[in-house]
Image (cartoon, rainbow, N blue to C red):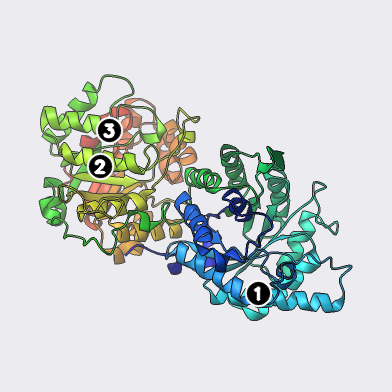
Amino acid sequence: MMATRRDTPFREAMRSLLVFDGAMGSLLYERGVFVTQNFEQLNVTRPDIVTKIHEDYVAAGAHVIQTNTFGANAFRLDRHGLGDQVRRYNLAGAKLARAAAGEDVWVGGSIGPTGLVPGVATKAELDLAAATFAEQAAALVDGGADVLVLETFRHLEEIRIALDAARQVAPDTPIIATMAFDPSETVADGSTPEHVATSLRDWGADAIGVNCGDGPQIALTMAERMRVVGLPLCVQPNAGLPRTIDGRLLYMATPEYFDVFARRTIQIGATMIGGCCGTTPEHVRWMAKSSRMLGDRRAAVMRPSAVRATETVPLVEPTPLAERSAFAAKIAAGRFVVSVEVNPAPGLDPSRALEGAKMLLEHGVDIVNVADAPRAMARMSNLAFCSLLLERYGIQPILHVCGRDRNLLGQMAHLLGAHAIGIRNLVIITGDPPKVGDYPEATAVYDLDAIGLLQMASNMNRGVDPAGKPLPGGKTSFLLATGLEPGAADLDREIRRLEKKKAAGAEIVMTQPIFQTDLLENVLGRIAHLGMPVLVGVLPLVSYKNAEFLHNEVPGMQIPEEIRERMRNTPGGEAARNEGVKIAREMLFAVRDRVQGAYLMPPLGRYELALEVLDGLKR
């Protein structure tokens, strides 16, 4: 079963990367609700319009949607003669958001300021503020909120009152405390971002941040200064300052600009990004795209429900593994298998790679795999190259599929096309962002990451398309492989993702290159509970310069110092090539009894190196 929001406590999730929704009030106004109407009352009188906004944000990619309860405290409601409706409107607002969020999106209970000025308000008024904040918080949690979001506060003393009140009635619920800063870069009482951050931490906030204000730029500046404490950081600015155009109040910061803002905010360390006044589902869609491009540290990109069968469409049994392809039959039989990566060179002529694939299979290699524009470089599409392998030589390859270049519809078409021409083996990965390749200005898509792609392909193997409808023509019969980085900087996260990949449908693992047997032994021990066949990645080095580049500049690649020293002490040219082959053989022969296969990546199209590494392996 695909993991849901309830599998991860929110306190843990907000240290990864979460995209919040955008505005509620300005969007209600845009959709025809007049400004004299109390917006929180709509939770009861017009739940349809509130629910539609929540659903639009979920569809746009928000991981967290916030309740329509910002002004649902006694002071603000009393302006409309509704001061006795605090619990009713907050409870209704939380239930609407909870229903729209489903199992895969978190709900933030929105609590805004009362409008009191602490230095002017009486003690009785401040006591009433504490009471109404407590009533709000209790109702929001009762209605299903996963986290309480104190937002757009301008006075430190008032947000302290709100924090204390919320903590008393909801001691186990995480609280995010965000404030709005003036153009002078202080809050209303003159406190600096550094002082605000320290105070909120000392008062017990689980996360801190900036929202509303004059737009993304000042929010970014304030957030950077609030990093003085080690709490998760949440940034949700307005879409700039509003302007009156043709009698309407419009915000001018475009969704594309929020794409730039999101990238910069993630880069300074914020783990929660979203929008406030003037932002729309389109702004959120662009921010979600940015979060995916920069490594979306959340478990999955699209909501699993978007690529999962509905309850009304039964899933059929997938084709038995051994019947999907010759390679799958070998995996099912427990045979040791060897795959070698073969990629066409950039340009129009794939002949060298085609001949290389033919040569490899003639010399005993079980299968070749073809990457999907590796290192974000432009090449002939791997689907076209695989088609040539099938057409000219009858070679059944493994097709890499990554989430970078195709949207959901494109991925669906890609997989259907692959199956139609006879492709039965897939390795599914998220893919390198364009910024690491030759075309950093190219736009990444990432509608689906590896987990979402695996879920989609797995559902297709069970006869269901991404919309939850029966797949016309029956079902696909793909073998589903996925990747693993044993040298990942955060190995715990990498293993958690592998667990989610298996839950989404992954059947075998193909690792990135490994140069340390002890590293592989550690990883194999930690993933043994998954019971997944593993093909260990092997890359023969060709020079000391090559070793240094891989170790220092390729994420997830670790080459021990003693290996690099061996390459440094070896003369260049043929001697270095031979030493690289020797190192690769030593590693592979040492672990061959612990894995089900080898995945070789010969550098620069030198396929003969793969055969030298493999010489005598199966004997």
Which disc is residue 382 wearing?
Answer: 3
Which disc is residue 32 wearing?
Answer: none
Category of crowding for the residue at label 2, using alpha-carbon neighbours closer than 10 angstroms: few (below 14), some (14–19), many (at least 20): many
N-term-proximal mark, 3 vs 1:
1
Category of crowding for the residue at label 1, using alpha-carbon neighbours closer than 10 angstroms: few (below 14), some (14–19), many (at least 20): many
Residue under numbered circle 1: 86
Q: Nearer the viewer, residue 114 or 516?
A: 114
Task: Answer whether residue 334 is visible to the viewer in this image.
Answer: no
Residue 117 position (above or below residue 266): below
Residue 154 lies in what quarter of the image? bottom right
CB contact under 8 Å: marks 3 and 1: no
Q: Is residue 366 left or right of residue 589?
A: left
Task: Answer whether residue 444 is visible to the viewer in this image.
Answer: yes
Badge 1 element: helix
Q: Nearer the viewer, mark 3 or mark 2?
A: 2
Which disc is residue 415 wearing?
Answer: 2
- How many numbered discs, if any? 3
Q: Nearer the viewer, residue 124 or 509?
A: 124
Task: Work out which quarter of the rendered image holds the N terminus and state it.
Answer: bottom left
Residue 583 lies in what quarter of the image? top left
Q: Amino acid at mark 1?
A: Val
